[in-house]
Image (tube, rainbow, N blue to C red):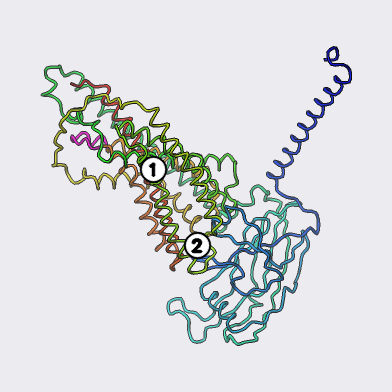
Amino acid sequence: IANKVGPSSCLSVVFAERRHKDREMLCYVLALAVGAWASSGPRYPLHEPLKVIANKVGPFNNPSETYEYYSLPFCSKTKKKRHEDFGERLVGDRRVASPYEVTFMDNVPWRLLCDQVYSRRELKLFTRAIENDYYFEFFIEDLPMWGYVGEVEGEDVLLGPLENVRRYIYPHLHFSIGYNEDQVVSVNVSTNPQRKVDITDEFDGTEVTFSYSVDWVPRPDLKWTDRMSRYHDSRFLPGTFEIHWLSIINSFVLVLLLTAFLTIIMMRVLKNDFSRYMEVEEDELGEEETGWKLINGDVFRFPPMANALAAFVGAGTHLFVVTFLLLSCAIAGFFVPTKRGAILTAMIVLYAVTAPVGGFVSGRLFRQFAGDSWLANALLAVLVFPAPLTAVFAWVNSVALAHGSSAALPATAVAGIVALFALVAFPLGLAGALVGRHTASDFKAPCRTTRVPREIPDDAPWYRSPPAQMFMAGFLPFSAIYIELHYIFASVWGHKIYTLFGILFLAFVMLVVVTAFITVSLVYFQLAREDYRWWWRSLLCGGATGAFIYAYSFFYFFNRSNMDGMIQGSFYFGYMAVISYAFFLMLGAIGFFASLTFVSHIYSVVKAD
């Protein structure tokens, strides 16, 4: 370089390369620093202020019925709202700065917050909240803590409020904050029953003194990365953690043994069928055919309403990919699943960017079914899941808005989701359908399809009827995930924070495997009685678990929870219907592809006219 461009140019090139390497090293160090901070959390010097964030209030038994914290007349120096991210808005968080002053490692025996004089109307708000078991939610360092607004004394469990019932408000809060060296690893808030104030009489001019205290507790056993583990089940850990693993392992072993047993039976039956069919001479074939071999000319006859079937299968495949990627990302740590709203945000983003999968599968399958109106099929595939979800959301959000609940999604969040679907998911879904149609070839069936459909026997016993088969197809996969379903419900519709995503992934694998095996078995028994209408049956049998999940939601609501009210009921049954429908589509697609693979295989290895 020096011989061609001169010494000065050589030096400039050398210095430029050195500056480039320095910038790369600086970026690398900064990236390491940011990663270390993200993995180890913020650190505080002595006397550093910590923000106490007030979030919401609402009935403790109705987690979806929430209201802004200052919908009750608590004292406040400022009602400045804290900026929530997209996921926090989705779950109904409306965080505001509270007047509580907390500094790192500084104990506070007692400190006045404010003296508040209430009118009779304001006291009625507190009275209503106390009678409905309202709780409040605070955050310190994104760690949630809960406490009751007040209590009712003199109330009978069966008879309800008595004549001498008294209502008390808790004006004093005690914050217990755990620390490990210079990090905050646990928080808790409690009320002092000795300092409660009687507000039963509800007269104007009632004065209430609000105060608080702070106690710092050393927690050297709890690391910052494990600080969310205590929220999984604070009453029973670590006992139920071991029981949880043992129950899942027990279910996994039972499912494995049952699947192996079913596989051995199917292999033996198919081996006998293959041996009999392969030994038959060509001139005796028409007289000797029985069972599923007899319908070789009809088994690959295209199903009715092929457009809808292809759309359902495409939408189910799309949801399967979203679920698999979501659980994989949660386990791999691509996002923090315990952060409020993080799972919902990741789910929406993954659904949008994987939209081509559903369109591709639907368009390809519809083309193989010899369908012509590809645009109608693509639109149906793209809208078959979002359309019911939108209808349920419109109803639920309207109910929340009518009651003034903070669970109602803001207009900005709604606009963001609509824009993401309209500008990303919708066009990608159509593009996937177009690609799937143009890359698909004609359906290559192992057997020729006859011109005239064969008559289907109608003397099948009741246990081989479609409802009975769907019941059997849904019960076995549901029993495999029943235990884990209880923990998920307690997290989604309760105040627990789910952290065991490894167990959840294992339960998901069991669900997929069992669904595929039971659907294939039932399709074989259907073909054995010379009923070739297996296309739709495989989808319905595979997705039958969704009906069991929705039925379990009723059992959980009335027997395992204390939820009630219009808002909570609308949220619970509305969104559980959507979730069950999503499971129907996803597992239906699993059952369809498993059955298609099985049927194509068994008819490809036997002789047919």
Where does the C terminus fall, quadrant-wise?
top left
Q: Residues within 10 Å of mark 2 (few under 14, many from 20)?
A: many
Residue located farthest toward the right when viewing the structure as drawn: 7
Tell which tag, 2 or 1, sits nearer the viewer: 1
Residue at 55% of width from left, 79% of height from top? Answer: 127
- Asked whether residue 545 is drawn in magenta, I would say no
Relative side of 159 to 536, left or right: right
Q: Amino acid at mark 2?
A: Ser
Q: Which residue corresponds to mark 2?
A: 64
Where does the N terminus fall, quadrant-wise?
top right
Q: Is residue 380 above or below residue 388?
A: above
Q: Amino acid at mark 1?
A: Leu
Relative side of 541 to 226, left or right: left
Viewer can see residue 562: no
Among the 4 quarters of the image, the one containing residue 570? bottom left
Please tell me the numbered disc located at residue 379. Answer: 1
Q: Position of residue 468 (x, y in %)?
A: 24, 47
* Element class at badge 1: helix
Give the extent of the magenta segment: 523-533
Q: Position of residue 21 (x, y in %)?
A: 78, 28
- Of residues 4 and 305, the one nearer the viewer is 4
Please tell me the numbered disc located at residue 534. Answer: none
